[in-house]
Structure formats: structure tokens, C-alpha cells
Image (spheres, helix red, strand yellow):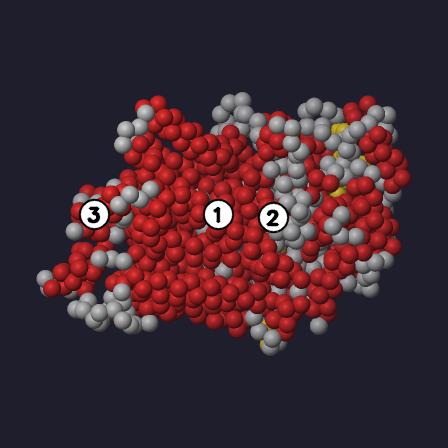
Amino acid sequence: MLAKRSSLDGGYWVFLLPGAIALLLVIIIPFVVNVAISFTEWNGITSPTWVGIANYERAAHDKTFWLSFENNLYIIVAMTVIPTLVGLFLAAFLYDYVANKIGKSAASVFRAGYYLPQILPVAIAGVVWRWILQPRWGVLNWLLGLVGLEPQNWLGDADIAMYSVMAIMVWFQIGYPLVIFMAALQRVDPELYEAASVDGANWLQKFVSITIHQIRPEIFVVVLMTLIHSLKIFAQIFVLTRGGPGRATIVPSYFAYQNFFERANIGYGATISTVMTVIIVVLTILFIRVQSRQELREAL
Amino acid sequence: MAQPFASDNLKKALALLFLTALLVVMLFPFGIVTINAIKTPQEYASDGPLSLPGGIYTQGLRDFWERVDFTNKLVNSTVISVTVAVAGIGLALLNAFALGIGRVRGRVWFLIFFLMANTLPQEALAYPLYYFAKYLGLYNTRLSVIIVFSVIQSAFGTYLLTSVFSTFPREILEAARIDGASKFQLLTRIVAPISRPTLSVLFVFFFIWTWNEFFLPMILLVSTSNQTVPLAIAVLQGQHNMDATTSSASALLGILPCIVFFLLFQRTLTRGITAGSVK
Amino acid sequence: MRKKLLSTTLVLLAVLIAVAPNLSPRAAAQEGEVFKIWHYESPNGAMGIAWQAAMDKFQEMHPDVTIEFESRGFEEIRQTAPMILNSDEVPDVMEYNKGNATAGFLSANGLLTDITDVAIERGWDQILSPGLQTTSRYEDGIMGSGAWYGVTNYGEYVMVYYNVDMFEEYGVEVPATLEEFENAMQTFVDAGITPLSVGATEYPGQHIFYQLVLNQADREWVDAFQLYQGDVDFHDEAFTFAAEKIVEWVERGFIDEDATGIPAEDMGVAFTNGEFPIMASGSWWYGRFMNEITGFEWGTFLWPGNELHAGSGGNLWVVPANARNKDLAYDFIDITMSPEVQTLMGNEGGIPVNADLEQIEDVKIQELIANFNAIIEADGFAFYPDWPAPGYYDILVSGVQELIAGTMSPDEALDFVADPYFEYRESVAE
């Protein structure tokens, strides 16, 4: 570590003890158990039977398994890429323009409104979106009809079901980056902006070199967390499409759930979960190393 | 920079228009939930979910409230969510203090280690946690849910706070140390207060996320007297049909505490920390 | 400062409340003092009302016992029953699903009480016809024979609901054969109306598929498929006929392609509003239609040309192996089987198994029960297509969706639904 050794260092590890112990007991050990289960065949009640890597071999040849990960790529776009980008601009817009030109309370009202989708229980949100997207009398098709466009079978047509789900996920997810970024913007020293204005920088230049730069910790956090959530997505698929029509919107979490709780194939379910987790963990490691290397570069 | 008065107002109007349109899209589903919450089942059956109700019908909700003892569910949810929020922040603060401020060796790996709590899919945890809870006598207790979610939420908190603390101005910390502050005082007197906006965000998030949790509470809480609001609402999803109007009504009632919470803390969130205080 | 005090107090309170119940010693559950019963029927439905009356009667019979009734969710019990019953947090009696995948699975793993002796002693085996008993008896997890692990106290079956007014308007007669049924639907199509209301997002699609299979099947076929008593070929006449029929019906406009986006709830509501003249689904809609259909006259007929119909005894009362008050449980079950409670159930729109038929007032309900009894007489219960294996429901729903959408050919769809079936069946055989 290249950071200057100051009177700050040393002896901080003791603060890690409570969190580390709790994590070990509640998460790590159960995870290890889960990995162990993935090498067995088990119905959840009687004793498991050891089968070695049979489950993994099965997964390698299982079309549904690969399809679920492929579908997940779309979800990543809908839950990470779009919300982060939109959230950034919207946060800056609300914090900067709206708060100053229109009023702080206006900015708060909009922020609260945009965040509200995150509060609605997924089950209810699912029901409501199914009503909106209903092929026969749903609002969306009715609106389309008004302007002369074709009604669609939004959640029942295998070709467009995934896009419908993606749109709903964007709706759901935007509030999350928005709130985090708006809180982050409060940390930015206004004097930086003033200095840049004096130097003749325009809005976009200030946005990129100051705003984004200053809140990059939060940007990293948002991207990584939304990425993890996308890879784990379950509840929305469960209430909207159950992985259908056919298997058009199946995702790994839902596929694992089917095996755990519907087919009583605990071993195979554990296999799918383990693969998912390994992917997520690898991504996390890569991400955090990039982030910490960036910070190191800044500190010099 | 002198700008024509009209053009300035035009820009403001356009901005408001765009933002309000977006707001309508975001809140539209809530509107639908609301109109169905006060409909009679007959209205729903004959006119569909997207029609306006004739009047305000509350009998379905009242019957449901009694059927599941909704008051009890609200209490359970509140107790669990508040405790988890506090515990989660506590753990996160301790962890992030060590990693972000203290720069413990191997901090990158510790961070990844803590983040594991968030990377694991809940389905994978279900069976192991079920067996552990049974073994420890915690099966069917709210405490089991509190413990599990405190750890899960604290992972995100650890990550966010560590990231923020990494850019914490070192001069302040050094100055305090020179003044003789202990590490613990550093945490409670300086670091925590300055991070208040972030902590507030965490509190709101943890409360809301825990409130809406469905899966692990369903696994760990057996008796209805221990169950939470989302589980109670799920009772309305029958084997062959769903009580749509009562579901809508109970959902709205169920999220009221979250909304209240969010609005209360909006004030803390908007209270900016000016650069002056940092200096 | 005050905010800090308030929040600190709130937090301390929350923690105290959270921990407190776990600190106090568990109130000693004295034998015979508390009777726990769970079910997931709606309190306004026929079963809910009848069982509430049963609980009242039980209270009269056992005045010293405290009844602890919990109204549960169907999905919740479906997903967590294996976990709950494998612990001490069990009720004394509860409603549970019937079939290999559910009651069969639990009984094979020792989580349900064998109540054969009780059933004989109390005469339940006399009340339920052999056809109805099938779902109550399991051997090694396969239903049909063996010990009693549950008791059913009501019935259900799939039929065809139709809009009498619309049939009259277009000069359509109630069909007696499948061909007549198709002609009837063709008449509607020619008039620009889609005849069948189908909710293929959920179970209705696979029920229609099954009814078509049954059109070509026989009792032996059903026993092979459901009870594992013979070989099953997913490309045999019956299955192929049904798969091809679904595709044909979509092509001819009997089933709307959009049905893949319609949940069961919407299917029922659409029929209630007179948007479709025909709806093929189960008796669980009957009571609701009686209350909600006001715009036209409606009726029902059994699936034309079938001797076998989807249907069976209803959900079971099961007594968990770890239950503490089994005798009380048996008393309660007995009460729900009694003519008094059964007749009440019938009058509220359910299908009783032991009602005093003379006391059934409503003509429509008499019709409902009469059709059910006709199936019993003909030994026509074919159960439900998703029973043979756990999780089979999702597979069938998917498969039928692919057929309707045209994304899988009949052969491909049949292969798709075949694999999971054999996978489970083979694992049970071991």
C-alpha cells in the first residue's frame, strides 16, 4: 500500500469484527452449504445423495439454463445501463436546474415521485402492470389505438415479452440511482464549479470533469449494485410472466427457484445458484479492483 | 449574463412539462392501484380494473384487516424494518470505518467479502438458513429475520460508505488525531455526523427494502402472528383467483409507512452540507 | 437533539419488542388446550363459510379447547409446506393440495399422519366413492391406493360454461359431441366473435389441452399417466390429437392468439361481461358467477364427447405427523364431513360429498351437483394434468403457450412436456 503512513493507521481491524462474524454465520456458511448441496441430489427432507459433478454436467447441456443467462443480458441493460445513465442526468438536472431555478421543494417532490415505484410491493406492481399491458382492454393498447397504432400482446408474445419486462424494470429502477446521486451531489464543493466557470467551461464540461468525477464513488456503487440486482432478479419475473411465454423471459434465479421449490430438485437448484453466485462474485471482484486502482491513482 | 426574461421562463416551463409528464408515467400504476382500492368487487368484475369507481368502498378492506389482523402485521413489519435499518447502518459504519478510513490491509478483499452478502441469491440461502434457524431455535421468530436482513442490508451500506469514506478529507482526521481523539471518537464525533446525508439515504433504503421483503420472511416466519405485511397481502392470492380490489387496498395501506418514512427523511436528505463545514 | 432522542427511543422500543417474545419461556402447550387449524379458502367462499360453521360446532363439542385458526395463503403453503411440516411449528389439521407432487411427496417422506384406521372407524371410506378416495390415498408417494393420508370433503371438476343468451341469438344448440362443439364455435367465428375465453398465462390453457386428450383416452390411460400404473407415450393418439387440436383451434379462430397474455382472472371477468360466449374451466367459478353474472343467462355442460373429465375430490384435510392434538383433528374433520356442514357448503355454491340433496335450494347448484354425481357414477375423474410431477404446472402452461403461439410444433411441445414427467417418475421408481 502506497498511502502515507500517518497516525491514522493501525488497529482498525477490530472494527471489522462484528460485521465479519455476522457475515460468516449468516451468509458465508450457508453459501458453503449451498455449494455442498450442489454436488448432491436432494428433495429437501430426507438425506441428500452424493452425485459429484452430475448436476453441473446437466446444466452444461440444459438449454433452459443457457437461455436464462442470455435473457439476463437484456435485464442488465434495463436495470443497470439505462437507469444509471438516466439517473445521472436526471439527478443533476433536478439538483442543479430545478432546485435553483424553480425551487428546492419542486426538486424534492419530483425526486419523491420518481422513487415511489421502488416502494410499491413487487406483487402489486406486477398485477397493475399486467392490467396496463392487457392485450384486450389494457391502457397501453387503448392509447395506441387512439393514435392509430397496432395493439400488441405485450406479455404474451414471445418476441416482445422481454422488451415489455425491460421497460417495466426501467420504470422500477430509475428512482434508486436518482436518490443516491442527488445525495451525492451535496458533497460537491460549489467553489469547484465557480472556478471552472471562471476558466470558461460550459455546462457539459463542468458536468463531466467535476460532477461525474466528484461523485464517482457513488457511480461505482450504483453500477455494481444494479448489476448484482439484475443478475439476481426474481420477483418481477415471478409476478409478470413466470418466465413465459414459453421460456421467453426465464432468468437464472427463477429457474433455480423452480428447481428448489416446485420440482423439489434441491441439488440442481443449488447448482444453478452456485454458478450465478460465482459469476456475480467474479464481476464484483473485477469491479472493486478497478475502483480501488482508480482511487489509488487519484490519491497520488 | 443577461438573458431575455421570456426565454428563461419558457425553459422553465418546458422543464416542468417534461418532468411532470415523466412523473405521471412513474405514478400512473399507483393511480390504478388507488382506484381499485376503493371499488366494490362487482364494479371490478363488470367494468374491469381500469374503470373509475362509483364511490368509496371499504368493506373489503375492513374484512381483510380483521381476517389477517393487519394491525399485528404492521407492528411486525415496523419492528423488523426499523431494527434492521439501525443494525444495518451500525454494522456498515463499523466496517466502512475500518476499510475506508482506517485503510486496513487487504481492504479490497474485505470489501468483496462483505459484498458477498448481497451477491447470494435468496433462494440459495433458503434451505441452509431454514435448517440453521431450526437448529438454533430461531425458526418462526422475528429475530431470525432481523439477523439475516441486518447482515444482508449492511453489505450494501458497507460498500457505499467505504466508497464515500475513501474520499474523506484526511486533514480533518489527522487534525483530530493530533488533538488526541481516540479512533472511536473519530467515528462518532467526526465521521458519522459528516456522513449524515448518506446515512439517511441508507436508513430509508434499508427500511423500505426490508419492509417489502417477501421470500425469506415467508420461509422463516411460520405463524401468522409473526408475519409481515407483504405476507399478509399474499393471502389474497387464492388458488384459482385473486381478490383484486382488496389486494389493491391492502397494498396501499401496506406502503403508507414507507411513504411516510421517505417523506420524513426527505428533509434530512435535502439539508445540504456546505463546503464551509468541511473546512 | 429531540429528533435523536425520539429516534433512539423508537429504535430501543423496536429492539425490545423484537427480542421480548423470544426471551419469555414458551407457554407450555398443554395437551388438548389449543387446537390449531389452517386453511387457505376465502372466508366468503362456500368452503370458508362451511368450515367456519364446522369450527363453531367443534367449539360446542369441546368448550374447553381454544381454537387457533390461521387464514393462510395458497402460494405460501404450496411453497413452504415441506419446510413447515418438517418442524414443530405445525398445526393440528390443515388444508393441503392433493396429488403425487404435493400430498404424495409429503406422505412418502413421513410428514403426514397415516389416518387409515381413523377413516375406517369414522366411516369416511363409506362416504367417499372409490373415485373420490383416490386423492386421499397414497402408497410410496403415488396416489390411488394404499394408506389414507388425507381426506377430501368437497369436489371439483372442469366443465364448459356458456352464455345462454348468445347461444340463442346465434341459433347454437348445446353440443353433445366434439364435432358439434366445433361447429358451434365455427358459427360464432363466422359471426365475428371469438368463441372461447382462455387464460393461457395460467392454468386454463392446460386444462383445455387435457380435456382434449381425455376425449381420446380411457380409464387405463388415466391410471397409467396419473397413477403410474402403466406405460406412457407422449406421442400416442390421445396426446397428439390434443396438441394438433389446439393448433387447429387457434388457426380456425376458436382460441385467440392473445390468450397467452391473459391470466385466469381476466378470462373469468371477460366471460362475466359477455365478451365471449364460452369458457371452459372449473367449478370454482360457479359460486362467483352466481353472484356476479347479471347481464345474461348462463348455463353449463360437460365437455362434449368425453367420458372422462378433469376433476377430483377437492383439497385434503391432512394431519401433520408432528401434530400435537390428533384426536381433536379427527373430530374436526368428522364435523366437516357431516351432512349438516356439507349441506351448508352446497347451498353456498360448493360441491359437497355428503350433503342432504333435498335441502339444496338453488336450482343452479342442484345442476352443479348433479353433473358432479354423474361423473362419479361413470367413474369419470381424470384428476388434473399437472399432478403427476412436482413443478409440472409451469411446464404444461409453458408448453401450451408455445402451441398457441406457434413457437413449437405439436411434436416439439409434446417432447417438451414429456421430459420432466419421466424425470420425476423415474426418480420415484427408485
Residue identifier under label 1: A82
Q: Residue furthest left?
A: B179
Q: Is residue C67 visible?
A: no
The residue lying toward the viewer, choosing from C56 and A258, is: A258
The residue lying toward the viewer, choosing from B37 and C245, is: C245
Q: Secondary structure at mark 2?
A: helix
Identify the disc placed on residue A223. none
Task: State the CA–CA distance, disc 1 to disc 2.
Answer: 15 Å
Q: Amino acid at mark 3?
A: Ala
Q: Mark 1 or mark 2, which has the lower sequence index?
A: 1
Identify the disc placed on residue B275. 3
Task: State the CA–CA distance, disc 3 to disc 1.
Answer: 31 Å
Chain name for mark 3: B
In the rendered view, would you say A49 is above or below C236?
A: below
Image quadrant of residue C79?
bottom right
Spot occupied by residue C316 in the image (x, y as percentages of width and height)? 65, 52
Q: Is residue C268 visible?
A: yes
Q: Residues within 10 Å of mark 2 (few under 14, many from 20)?
A: many
In the figure, is residue B149 to the left or right of C118?
Answer: left
Do marks 1 and 2 both belong to one polypeptide chain? yes
For image coordinates 67% across by 47% down, the residue present is A158
Residue identifier under label 2: A162
Q: Amino acid at mark 2?
A: Met
